[in-house]
Every structure is written in structure tokens, then in C-alpha cells.
Amino acid sequence: MKGFCPFCAEHREKATPRFTPDIFPEGRLTQGEAFLIPNLFPYDIHSGVVVMSDDHVVGLRELTKERLRDAFALGIGFLRRIAAIDGSLPYHLMTWNYMPPSGGGLVHPHQQYFATAHPGNQFTDELSASRRFAERCRQNYWYALAKREATENERYIARLGSGHWIASFVSLGLLGEVMCVFPDVFSLDDFTDDDIDDLVAGLERVFRYYEDAGVFSFNASLSFGPCDQEYFSCYFRIVPRTFLNMRDFAPDLNFFQAILSEPICVVLPEDLCRELKPYFK
Ligand SMILES: [Zn+2]
Ligand SMILES: [Zn+2]
């Protein structure tokens, strides 16, 4: 079943907005199948949407290396362009709702990219906690986390290039959370094409695990701090989304999250790590 979709190739030209010439004289940007447009519901001053494919329905298996790499490269390139035009927005964020259980408004795969001064409570809390940790302990929290997890080897999934894949010791999602920490990347400026390749390589492995585990929807994010600091490293975060049951299609978020702001998780990070590790071999 499929209604009207503005991201489908045959509707894009008419149904999607263009950037104003002061930002992108081109109006829209593409890389491979990835297609960048301004966000129709701008949460902040500068935000863009990367449509990741020509196809409307794209399963995890079809989120190929090329599609993922092109989407991330185009979105990050967009944020770099914004940073060059407007230096007053220090925080950069990619967010991604995949498939309807995640809250995604359209099945057609797409990511949001934000340049903002107000990155939200979780981001702000982690940023200030990272600053306090650095002041108190004279080291970068994310570097210390990756090192500690690698040493303990209970939640440490693998290292792929510059990225450390870890099952988070506290999860924001019901079915556990996977993070990829890039300890040496602090801002957008530091994130190279090699880092994108490393991220994509790990993400493909997570997707293979999701397929086997019956996960078909997720929320994900990629966060960058300001360019003048070395206490807040870049990290990618992904949590599966599902229905609590298939009889009533109850969503996996309920009063705990909506009223109490209390994440609950039914998976031990050590078990999640053990299940994921073979996919990273
Ligand atoms: Zn579509
Ligand atoms: Zn501006």
C-alpha cells in the first residue's frame, strides 16, 4: 500500500522545496541516490533532509554501503556548508527515524541534519557532563569510556578503524542501544571520509544482526560538539524500535517515557554485546 510520497523520484521536482540561493545556489544537492532538500518543518534555523534512495520501500538489506555512504557524506557536507555561512550554530546533529514504529513520518528512507544552538536536553546534558568530567579527571570522557570498555571486554563489540562499537551500559531504547564512539573526532571539521566509511562498515554489521533478530525499525543519531573543544567526542547511537505486541500494535514507548521520562530496557548490554560480536568478526 502506498499513498502520495513527495520523496519518490517522480514527485520530487514538484513536491519538495528548494534551498534559497544564499545557502545553495543549486537549490538542491545530490550524491549518488542521496538527495538533499530543506526540512519542511524546520526545528531550527538550518535543517535539511537527505532522501537516501530512489526506491520508496528500502529494507535493511538494501541500505547498501553506497546508499549509506552517499547519505552521510551529503548530509555532513550540508552541515559544513552551513557552518561556513553561519558560525553562530555550534552543534550539529543527524537524526534518523527508520520505518513507522520509530515515528518516521514517511516510509521512504530519509535522515535529518541540524545545525543548531539548541540541540535538546539529552545532547546538552551529555555535553555539560563531558565538560565536567574533563575538568575533574583531566581526560576526555569518551576516550576513557572506549578504553575502559575495551579493557573490561563485556560490552565492547569491536573497533572498526576510528570507531569503537559498544553496547551502552545504559540504554535509551527498550531493546538495548548500540553506540559507536569516535574519540578523536570533536566537531564536524574532524570527521573525514574514512570516518564515514568506518561508521558505515559497522552499521552494515548492526543491520545484519537486526535482520536476524527480527528488528525492522530504529532511531539513530550522530552528534558533533563545537569546534573549539576536545572534551566532547562524536558518537553515533542506534536503538531498535518495535511494537510491544502484534495483536494491538502497541508502541514500545508508553507512560514510562511519555510521562515519567524514564527509559526502560529489557536487554542486558552484556547479552546484546555477545549477540552482536559474531557479526563484527
Ligand atoms: Zn517514496
Ligand atoms: Zn543563518
Image: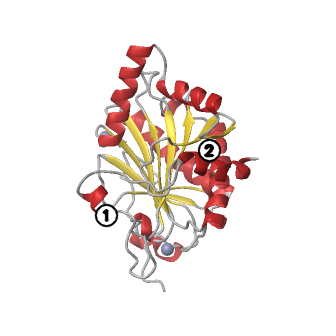
User: x and y percent of residue 137 in the render?
Assistant: 44, 15
Q: Amino acid at mark 1?
A: Asn
Residue at 31% across, 32% down:
88
Q: Amino acid at mark 2?
A: Leu
Question: Ligand 1 closer than 8 Å to the CB at disc 1?
Answer: no
Closer to the chain start, of discs 2 and 1, is 2
Query: Where does residue 14 sit, x and y in percent of width and height?
Result: 41, 72
* Element class at badge 1: loop
Q: Is residue 262 left or right of residue 8?
A: left
Q: Residues within 10 Å of mark 2 (few under 14, many from 20)?
A: many
Above or below, 248 against 161 in this view is below
Residue at numbered disc 2: 199
Q: Secondary structure at mark 2?
A: helix
Q: Residue 1: give x, y in percent of width and height.
A: 48, 86
Is residue 119 visible in this depiction of the protein? no
Q: Give the residue drawn at x 49%, y 41%.
A: 169
Is ligand 1 less than 8 Å from the beta carbon at label 2?
no
**Of all residues shown, which one is farthest toward the bottom?**
1
From this viewpoint, is residue 79 visible?
A: yes
The picture places residue 90, in percent across and down from the top left corner, at 36, 32
Q: Identify residue for label 1.
A: 254
Left or right, 49 with reference to 159: left
Q: Residues within 10 Å of mark 1 (few under 14, many from 20)?
A: some
* Displayed quadrant of residue 115: top left
User: Which residue is depicted at the point 52% across and 49% down?
Assistant: 268
